[in-house]
Image (cartoon, rainbow, N blue to C red):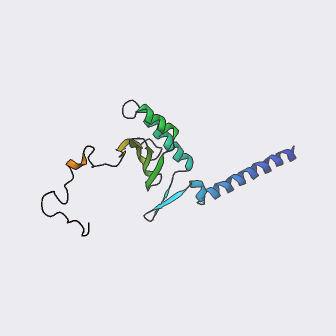
Amino acid sequence: MMKREWKVGVVTSALLVSTLLVSAVMQAGCASWYGPTVEVGGETYRALKKIEEDLLVEVARRYLKKNTPKVVSVRECDIALRTEPELKIVYTGDRRGEAYVTWEMPKRWLTVLFIGNFLERDMYCILQEKERMSELIDFRPKSDPSRYVTPVFPKGAGNSPSPAPGR
């Protein structure tokens, strides 16, 4: 019986030592434990991981879907669900700042703006829209252009160019 108790004690001690070792390595400031960082204005902040950025995009899609009949058309909501948006994050602190999730629609850009601590309860979002110019503005008249064009040499003004000699 004595041998059995001794083996259990060695296994328990080995587990305890390995747990303490792993804990010490994690507390030593291992950068991979805390995730990616970003430097802004000389300050280093913790950034969102890729999976958290994807979650932020999914929250933006749900927000658009929630506002579909009111602000966003059904067609625009379908486009947002099928396409990847542009994601721009401006950090002002650890996992805090502004995140712009933007979709390009046929007639406008839709942006869901997240402000505050990302993926926390105090984060809030705003839906923004910006109209696109579908074509360049053309100021040329569509009807008879002669009505709008002033001739350089009006007829009968006496300042018309003379015909070339020998003609």
**Picture quadrant where residue 155 is located:** bottom left
Asked whether 3 or 127 is in front, the reply is 127
Residue extending farthest to the top is 69
Q: Is residue 76 left or right of residue 152?
A: right
**Picture quadrant where residue 142 is located:** top left
- Location of the C terminus (image quadrant): bottom left
Residue extending farthest to the front is 166
Residue extending farthest to the bottom is 165
Q: Is residue 6 left or right of residue 36?
A: right
Asked whether 86 or 28 is in front, the reply is 86
Residue 106 position, x and y percent, is 42, 41
The residue that appears at 67% across and 55% down in the rendered structure is 22
Q: Is residue 104 above or below residue 42?
A: above
The residue that appears at 78% across and 49% down in the rendered structure is 11
Asked whether 91 or 93 is in front, the reply is 91
Residue 111 position, x and y percent, is 41, 44
The residue that appears at 53% across and 45% down in the rendered structure is 54
Residue 47 position, x and y percent, is 51, 54
Count of numbered tags: 0
The residue that appears at 13% across and 58% down in the rendered structure is 156
**Picture quadrant where residue 130 is located:** top left
Residue extending farthest to the left is 157
Q: Is residue 156 left or right of residue 164?
A: left
- Location of the N terminus (image quadrant): top right
Q: Is residue 31 above or below residue 164?
A: above
Residue 17 position, x and y percent, is 72, 54
